[in-house]
Every structure is written in C-alpha cells, then in structure tokens.
Image (spheres, rainbow, N blue to C red):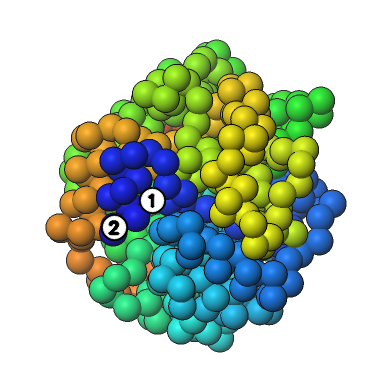
Amino acid sequence: MLTLARAALLQDAPVYVQFYITARCNLTCKQCNIIYANSDVREATLDEIKRIADNFARMGVAMILLTGGEPFTRQDLPDIIREFSSRGIHVRMQTNGLATDEHIHAAIEAGGRDISISLDSLWPGNQDEINGGFAKSWHDALRAMAAFSKYLPKEGSFASLGCVIQRDNLGDVEDVIRFGTEISWFTSLVPIHVTTFDQPMNFRTFDQTKRWRPEELPHVDRLVERVRALRAEGCLLYDSDQYLDDIKRFAAETPTTWRQHNANVCDSPNLYFAVLPNGDFAPCCDHRIASGIATYDPRFPEIYRSKVFRDEVLQVTRACPGCMYGSYPEMTISMRYLKAKLERFKLFVSAPPPKRWPVTYEQMLTIAERIRSEPRERVQLPGQQRRLAMADGSEQETAALV
C-alpha cells in the first residue's frame, strides 16, 4: 500500500510490471499474435528471475503480472511465483484456463492469489472458435475457474474474467459479465486490437476483417452503455467510466483520452512496463527498445532512473498512438483520475464485495446455461444470429435478438 500511495502522489514508481515469462501457448486465439511476436527470444532461467525479483523489490514494484503465451506451460511457475511473492511483490496470473487442478493448487500455494482467465463467450462452440478451433477449451476454462474458486482464499484474493470485445462475441459480452458476477468474478473488457504487417505489435491481430465497420460502431457504443448500466446495477465490472468511454473511441479508430493528463503519453516506465520472456525490459507488450537492457542486470535499478534510459523509452512512447489493453490504461486512470482512484480504494480496501466460493464446475455449467438461455434483449450486429444449446451438447443458430 505504501508503494501505491507513493505512486499516486508522484506518478513515478514502477507499481505494475507485466512479465511475459514464455511465448509458448496451447491456444492460437484469433485476436492475439504474441506467440509469434515473442518467439524470437529465449525464456529467462529461474536464477535470472531471482535476480529480477531482487531488483524489483529494490525498486518498489508493487505488483507483477505473470503472463505469456500461457504461463502454466512453464513447469517452474510455482517457483517463479514464490520468488516474487516472498519479496513482498503481489503476483497476478493471466491464463487461458487450460491448467490442471494440481498446477493451479501449486501456484496458489506459492503465493499467486490474483487470477485473470480469458472468457469471451458463454457459448462453448463460439469460445472454442475464438480460441483457434480448440475443442472443449471453454469447458477447460470453466474447470480451471472452479479450481481457483476452490483453492483461493476468500480474503486477500482477486479473480477476474478477461473478455475481448469483437465482432464474434458482441452479443455475448453482457452474459459473460452476468456470469462472472454470479460466481463472484469481476469482468474486464478489452476492445480487439488490429494492426498491419508493416507495424507488428504483440497482442494485435493482423486480420483486417476484425476491424469495426462504421455501420457497426453504434452497436459497440450501445454495448458499452449497457455494460455501464450493469455495473450501476451491481454487476462486477472492473472498468472505469474513463476506460469505457475510450473503448468507444478506440473502436472508431479515433484518439483515446486516458493519457491526456500526461501530455498524451502513457506512463511507461514511470508507473508500469513489460519484461520479455528473456528478461529484457520493454516499454509495454507492443513495443521494444533497441538497447536490450536486461532487468536481471544488477545495475538495472540505476539504469531505470537514468536520463539516457528514460529518453530512449520516451522516443517509443511518444510515437505510440495508444492502446486499450486494460491494465495499462486503468493503472494510469487509477493514479491520475480522482473518481477512479476512490473506486479502486473501495474495491480493494474499504468495501470489497463478498465471494460466494467455492463454485463447482457443474454449478458453473448450470449458471452459464441459464444466463445464455434467458430471453433478454442483447446488443448484436445486424443479421447476427443467436445460438441455442441443444440437448446433445451441440449448438443451433436462431434468429437474432436485437
């Protein structure tokens, strides 16, 4: 808390770090190309990670997100978690949910009390297709969520669903939020990011058909307002008003505003930055710097504070048009916008919502089936069809509800 308080005051403490501990993944999600973008670097050894943890403890890093690729593909993940948690650094894990009960338990026992699992739809077939055509990946994710809800302590833990807003799931987003609320998981939304081959960026798809068409933007705006209303009704949506407004702007490919309190430049490396699988510093998940500075170098805390280093990073961040990857914008918003700062304090300190854990896999199946089958109005694109779950487990499309 002292680190967070200092960051809120000075906006110059590396509160949050994303560490891409591997490029390996057991899925090939349509909206992500990071397994290719980071495949050119090796994975840091556990000894190097120990040195990274030492450096981050010296620097006052408050939270580290262990992600990938898929972090659970590293068999030494519990050891990695332990290196950071034993030094007082809060560990968050981001996973697609394809992990075994045993691995999940070991990660929690090592100190991983904060989890984000990707869930874009309550329809198994749609999620499997979004994940790259991997059968049963939706069911595997729910099994992992059940395991986390079994092993995570109710106090001092946090669980969320990461949901990417895209054409393939526009009508499913509201249901995901309702589902998360019923199982005591927050939902955090991310608009799909698209780039071109001449400007490769790690989490951005090259598929140009994923860009929103002008005639579709009113439906995106309508969805944002619907989920904002859900949050007002008590649903567990993590995203701030500033962030939700910028989802609309980002979908329309117009400038976002979350960086406006910092001369339209993001807060990397002041409040956050990324670490590549090999341990090298990166301004964020999308960009690298030419110098290849290793965060396990014992001199890194001094390098981090140097003007030469800051100037090199600024050349990258100043040229960046901005992203909407939830963690970076929300960290800036939480530190620079008073309303969001007060909301985060209430969420994590003064009045965190109660957790109705554990929730079994079978209970989750029942909840998901009920929510996706409710005859409510849903925001969908013109001509998009709703799916119905059949008794044999298959899915059938029916007329759209708009």
Q: What element carries label 2?
A: helix
Residue at left offset 58%, top offset 46%: 304
Q: Mark 2 points at which residue?
A: 2
Q: How crowded is mark 2: few (under 14 residues within 10 Å), some or many (20 or more)?
A: few
Residue at left offset 73%, top offset 44%: 33
- Could you tell whether 378 is left or right of 316 in the image? left
Where does the image place residue 340, in percent across and percent down from the top left? 26, 38
Quadrant containing the N terminus in the rendered view: bottom left
Where does the image place residue 320, in percent across and percent down from the top left? 61, 25
- Could you tell whether 121 is left or right of 235 in the image? right
Residue type beneath disc 1: Thr
Is residue 5 visible to the viewer in this orientation of the structure? yes
Q: Is mark 1 on a helix, strand or loop?
A: strand
* Residue at the extreme right of the image, as rendered: 40
Q: Mark 1 points at which residue?
A: 187
**Which is in the foreground here, disc 2 or disc 1?**
2
Residue contact between numbered discs 2 and 1, judged by CB atoms under 8 Å: no
Residue type beneath disc 2: Leu
